[in-house]
């Protein structure tokens, strides 16, 4: 397994987990839904990069770069859409034409990816970190589109942070702005500036994306949860389960990949040994032993003995050549006898190079670098690794040629070219990668099931507590047939007690209120009485004053 591909796999899985986690917190929330699709885009982007870096098959790598190009096309529009909803400017999205303006560029660049090579070049090159993709001639146009959308989104976010009156909203906007800005700068350098300057690096935007997705996840969930998002039991349990599954999946995938690679090579070795053993049965040993020098190459005997080997090569296109060797006078220096290959000007330069000639009778060959070939006099054998000589690079199988007495007098060799070996092994490895990809689906289904199964009752109880806070008559109806049933029973029992206390308090409050109302009425009557007496006293004083005035006048 290519270690340079693992960071892309990690960010892919992390984005998928965060998207599912945020959507699970509020499936009906528009912001949560857009964030989920944004994370899904990033997850597909990272997984595509992981596969084409891990694969040894060029056609697979080319296909995955096309898929990656589609994710490039959609993420700017999804990001801007997310920011518009977050900053409460979604009233601008009520018009269908606004949606067209938002997503038409994405559709345009997706179409370019699917039917042309203008955005993603039909070229990949193997580097030490895996296959490196190359961009097309219209990639600068995409960079302009991507920068316009992202910078405008950051501008809206910064404006919202300045104008927000609530401290929590201001903090949310600041977190989103900072995390997205860091990802934007890093990703622009690695995936926009570097390709335009023809600079190659194993670092890519997927290594920065998780910064923004984590930051945005914090901002979305922070306000909606009484407990901070990354301290919540749901997140802790989900993350622990996710890490455990990842720790199981990655080593298992690496083991599977290596096992398949080894199995592919071992199958080829067995095929080569089997084919070499079959080829040895087509050789007339007595006539073979009569071929002693290069002068015999022009004789009918040489062609007669060589003809069955040429037929075998023609019948099996995977075989490049079949040849025979016998031991020479010196140790580990063997001598060629037959070669099914015909001298041919492969590069068509008009000159027959040494590597274009067939092996001549009596031509010496040093077998000391090839331990498996040396074992061939004892029985069928095959190389474990690809070996190279002047004719090219091969994976070879060998078998002894025995005379009538059963004595090994020579060895027959069968060559598979290194390119054919790699093609066959790539097909095996492609199957392993498809297997790993398919395993990811049940892993995340299992993750969702585990989180929902174990934490679903907790979420249900959380809603019950919130409903009880609004209405003390609310009771939990959760049934799990496990320990949670006891929790629900105690909760409902506690709720009944609190409701009883609440009713008693209401009764006492009513009684006290009634007493207060009666006392208030008494005070009111007393007040009226006092006020009435005061008014009568005032009238009496007025009459007395009037009488006194009249007496004074009479005198």
Image: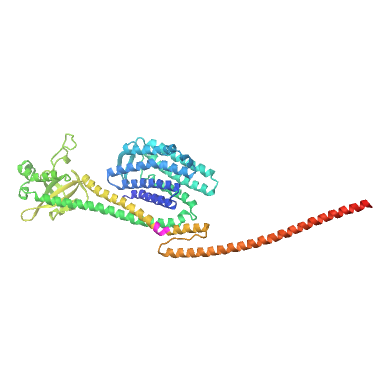
For this view, does 280 lie left or right of residue 39?
Answer: left
Residue beneath the point at 48% across and 41% down: 91
Image quarter of residue 132: top left
Image quarter of residue 341: top left
In x, y percent, where is residue 74?
Answer: 39, 41
Residue beneath the point at 39% across and 44% down: 205
Most distant residue in the right direction: 555
In this rendering, the count of numbered labels is 0
Of residue 553 and residue 172, the one placed in the foreground of this image is 553
Of residue 183 and residue 117, the one placed in the foreground of this image is 117
For this view, does 409 lie left or right of residue 237?
Answer: left
Residue beneath the point at 36% across and 35% down: 138
Of residue 487 and residue 526, the one placed in the foreground of this image is 526
Start-end of magenta stretch: 452-456
- Main secondary structure of the magenta stretch: helix
Q: Is residue 114 above or below residue 483?
A: above
Of residue 31 and residue 322, the one placed in the foreground of this image is 31
Q: Is residue 444 above or below residue 500?
A: above
Q: Magenta segment: does it hold 552? A: no
Q: Is residue 489 above or below residue 378?
A: below
For this view, does 498 lie left or right of residue 261?
Answer: right
In x, y percent, where is residue 433?
Answer: 29, 50
Q: Is residue 332 visible?
A: no
Q: Magenta segment: does it hold 453? A: yes
Q: Is residue 27 visible?
A: yes
């Amino acid at each position: 397994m290519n270690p340079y591909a693992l960071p892309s796999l990690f960010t892919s899985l992390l984005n998928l987990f965060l998207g599912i986690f945020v959507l699970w917190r509020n499936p009906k929330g528009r912001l949560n839904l857009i964030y989920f699709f944004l994370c899904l885009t990033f997850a597909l982007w990272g997984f595509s990069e992981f596969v084409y870096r891990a694969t040894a098959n060029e056609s697979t790598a080319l296909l995955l770069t096309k898929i990656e190009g589609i994710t490039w096309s959609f993420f700017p529009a999804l990001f801007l859409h997310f920011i518009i909803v977050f900053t409460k400017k979604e009233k601008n999205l009520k018009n269908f034409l606004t949606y067209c303006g938002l997503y038409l560029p994405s559709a345009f660049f997706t179409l370019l990816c699917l039917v042309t090579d203008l955005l993603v070049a039909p070229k990949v090159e193997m580097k030490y970190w895996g296959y490196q993709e190359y961009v097309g001639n219209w990639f600068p146009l995409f960079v302009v589109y991507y920068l316009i959308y992202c910078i405008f989104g950051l501008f809206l976010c910064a404006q919202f942070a300045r104008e927000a009156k609530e401290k929590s909203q201001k903090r949310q906007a600041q977190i989103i702005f900072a995390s997205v800005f860091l990802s934007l700068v890093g990703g622009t350098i690695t995936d926009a500036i570097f390709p335009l300057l023809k600079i190659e690096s194993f670092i890519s935007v997927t290594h920065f994306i998780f910064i923004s997705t984590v930051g945005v996840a914090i901002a979305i969930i922070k306000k909606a949860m009484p407990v901070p998002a990354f301290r919540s039991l749901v997140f802790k349990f989900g993350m622990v389960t996710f890490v455990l599954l990842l720790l199981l999946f990655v080593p298992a995938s690496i083991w599977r990949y290596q096992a398949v690679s080894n199995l592919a090579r071992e199958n080829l070795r067995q095929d080569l040994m089997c084919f070499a053993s079959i080829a040895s049965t087509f050789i007339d040993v007595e006539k073979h032993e009569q071929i002693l020098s290069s002068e015999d190459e022009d004789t009918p005997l040489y062609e007669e003995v060589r003809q069955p080997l040429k037929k075998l090569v023609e019948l099996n296109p995977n075989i490049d050549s079949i040849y025979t060797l016998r031991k020479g006078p010196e140790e580990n220096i063997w001598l060629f006898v037959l070669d099914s290959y015909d001298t041919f000007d492969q590069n068509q330069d008009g000159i027959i190079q040494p590597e274009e000639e067939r092996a001549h009778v009596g031509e010496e060959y040093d077998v000391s670098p090839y331990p498996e070939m040396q074992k061939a006099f004892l029985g069928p054998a095959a190389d474990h690794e690809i070996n190279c000589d002047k004719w090219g690079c091969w994976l070879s199988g060998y078998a002894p040629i025995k005379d009538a007495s059963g004595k090994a007098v020579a060895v027959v060799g069968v060559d598979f070219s290194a390119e054919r070996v790699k093609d066959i092994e790539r097909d095996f490895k492609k199957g392993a990668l498809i297997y790993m990809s398919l395993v990811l689906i049940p892993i995340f289904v299992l993750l969702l099931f585990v989180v929902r199964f174990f934490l679903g009752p907790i979420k249900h109880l959380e809603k019950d507590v919130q409903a009880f806070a609004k209405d003390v008559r609310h009771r939990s109806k959760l049934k799990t047939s496990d320990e949670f049933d006891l929790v629900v029973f105690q909760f409902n029992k506690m709720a009944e007690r609190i409701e009883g206390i609440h009713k008693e308090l209401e009764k006492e409050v009513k009684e006290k209120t009634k007493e207060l109302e009666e006392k208030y009425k008494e005070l009111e009557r007393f007040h009226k009485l006092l006020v009435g007496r005061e008014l009568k006293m005032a009238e009496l004083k007025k009459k007395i004053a009037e009488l006194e005035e009249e007496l004074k006048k009479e005198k």
